[in-house]
Image (cartoon, rainbow, N blue to C red):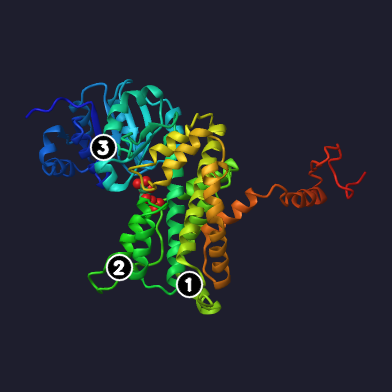
């Protein structure tokens, strides 16, 4: 059957690109596809089953452009960085001013800002897409940047292919101009790192503190997934812990090397938070922990010299669950506060409840708690989540357990950097009279940097200053 000439095209038929192209075709949008190796596009088309008649495989970039009807919307699913710039340069002479190129990779939002400002001869949009291969195929969460006009133009496609929240709302929305979509995706990934790290820390307490075997740990995560912690990441942690290795017959988790990979999005979030002066210590701790995890040799030398964790910990599984709930709230409170800071800094009208709603389904950090976060943020979008009545209550209930878990970790030599960082931030944030008066005194003492007085008197220096 002849295909209507598509308005939508896709470049890059790797795992994610291929899944996204099938999703788009399945939702009724004809799509032209191109891959650097032409055979890949041909094979993709041949394997597309009953969706093949909506897919136009093309051999060259020129073919791709020719196969599409104007105005075109070409989605790039190529590795972030140089490959995107190379594709934009290759497309520049072939596209018209009303054609739109959409970078759907994990771009650094500074790159997206730069590309949007560089005067490309076509329209340009950066979108954050989350959910892995499964999400791309059956419904990702989509965080779109770019102009409102381009969002309006693409909204029907994005909403059709996106995951749907339990109330049926598509998890696709416009975050703001330029790199705003990629920025929100980076924060999503920072939170993803933190959620994963805190789950790994509770796993470590069960394994090394309580001496539980992997097969005993799996049902604990499965149980947690039925309560307040219901989320994709807790669900897959249960599945990972429950899976067996066909080679040894034992739990596969016990065979996996304890060094985490990373492509950089968590680090970008931490760097950006430092630039913004926005405290996100749980995410920073998670990035740090991945970096430490990679240093296996040094860790082994450390254990040989300083000895393993001294003794078993006295922690209940209920405390661990409560600690994870508290840590999660604190981490998200930091992430949303960082986005509020970014909105002020970059002049973006980031819609916090809308972001929480987009994250409710499809993405890696999807969880039941995001419904309550969306609700709390719609009451007051800039109020820190730890101050919202619902979460303040939950923190009152769960922070005592977080204290016990962190204290047990410290006493028994179990590193819990993300949970500890969450607790330390919480304690700083609930202390009206902090300790920075000492810092200000020190700064003035050695550098005459001045300070403000509590009584408002205009005496900016201490008695140590020369008069
Ligand atoms: C998503 C994920 C995804 C990310 C991987 C790997 O939202 O679907 O965030 O975009 O690339 O999770 O990230 P790391 O290699 O940095 O762990």
Compared to 292, does 2 lie above or below? above
Q: Nearer the viewer, mark 1 or mark 2?
A: 1
Q: Which mark is residue 11?
A: 3
Q: Earlier in the sequence, mark 3 or mark 1?
A: 3
Quarter of image, res 347: top right
Query: Neighbour class for label 1 at 10 Å: few (<14), some, many (≥20)?
Result: many
Q: Secondary structure at mark 3?
A: strand
Q: Position of residue 49 (x, y in %)?
A: 11, 41
- Foreground residue, 375 or 282? 375
Query: Neighbour class for label 3 at 10 Å: few (<14), some, many (≥20)?
Result: many
Q: Secondary structure at mark 2?
A: helix
Compared to 86, does 248 lie above or below? below
Compared to 328, does 37 lie above or below? above
Compared to 311, does 199 lie above or below? above
**Residue picked out by circle 1:** 209
Q: How far is disc 2 from disc 3 in space, using C-alphas?
A: 36 Å
Q: How far is disc 3 from disc 1 in space, using C-alphas?
A: 49 Å
Q: Is residue 423 visible?
A: yes
**Residue picked out by circle 2:** 252
């Amino acid at each position: 059957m002849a295909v209507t000439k598509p308005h939508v095209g896709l470049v890059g038929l790797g795992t994610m690109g291929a899944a996204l192209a099938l999703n788009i075709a399945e939702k009724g949008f004809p799509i032209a596809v191109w891959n650097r190796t032409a055979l890949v596009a041909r094979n993709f088309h041949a394997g597309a089953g009953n969706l093949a008649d909506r897919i136009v495989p093309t051999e060259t970039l020129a073919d791709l452009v020719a196969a599409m009807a104007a105005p075109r919307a070409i989605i790039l699913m190529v590795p972030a960085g140089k490959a995107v710039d190379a594709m934009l340069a290759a497309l520049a002479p072939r596209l018209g001013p009303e054609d739109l190129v959409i970078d759907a990779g994990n771009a650094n939002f500074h790159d997206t800002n730069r590309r949007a400002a560089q005067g490309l001869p076509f329209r340009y949009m950066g979108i954050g897409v989350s959910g892995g291969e499964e999400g791309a195929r059956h419904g990702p969460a989509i965080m779109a940047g770019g102009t409102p006009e381009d969002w309006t133009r693409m909204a029907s496609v994005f909403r059709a292919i996106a995951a749907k929240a339990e109330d049926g709302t598509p998890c696709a929305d416009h975050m703001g101009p330029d790199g705003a979509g990629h920025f929100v995706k980076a924060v999503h990934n920072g939170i993803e790192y933190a959620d994963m790290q805190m789950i790994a820390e509770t796993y470590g307490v069960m394994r090394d503190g309580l001496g539980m075997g992997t097969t005993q740990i799996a049902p604990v995560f499965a149980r947690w997934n039925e309560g307040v912690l219901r989320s994709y990441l807790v669900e897959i942690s249960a599945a990972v812990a429950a899976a067996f290795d066909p080679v040894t017959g034992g739990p596969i988790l016990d065979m996996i090397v304890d060094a985490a990979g990373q492509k950089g999005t968590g680090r970008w979030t931490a760097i950006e938070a430092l630039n913004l002066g926005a405290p996100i210590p749980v995410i920073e701790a998670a990035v740090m922990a991945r970096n430490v995890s990679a240093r296996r040799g040094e860790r082994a030398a450390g254990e040989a010299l300083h000895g393993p964790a001294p003794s078993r910990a006295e922690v209940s599984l209920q405390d661990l669950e409560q600690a994870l709930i508290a840590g999660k709230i604190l981490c998200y409170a930091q992430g949303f506060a960082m986005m509020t800071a970014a909105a002020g800094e970059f002049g973006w009208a980031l819609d916090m409840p809308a972001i929480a709603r987009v994250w409710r389904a499809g993405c890696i950090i999807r969880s039941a708690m995001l419904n309550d976060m969306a609700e709390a943020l719609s009451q007051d979008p800039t109020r820190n989540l730890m101050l919202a009545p619902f979460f303040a209550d939950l923190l009152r209930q769960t922070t005592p357990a977080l204290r016990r878990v962190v204290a047990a970790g410290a006493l028994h030599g179990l590193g819990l950097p993300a949970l500890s960082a969450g607790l330390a931030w919480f304690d700083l944030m609930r202390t009206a009279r902090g300790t920075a008066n000492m810092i200000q005194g020190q700064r003035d003492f050695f550098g005459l940097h001045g300070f403000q007085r509590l009584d408002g008197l205009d005496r900016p220096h201490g008695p140590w200053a020369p008069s």
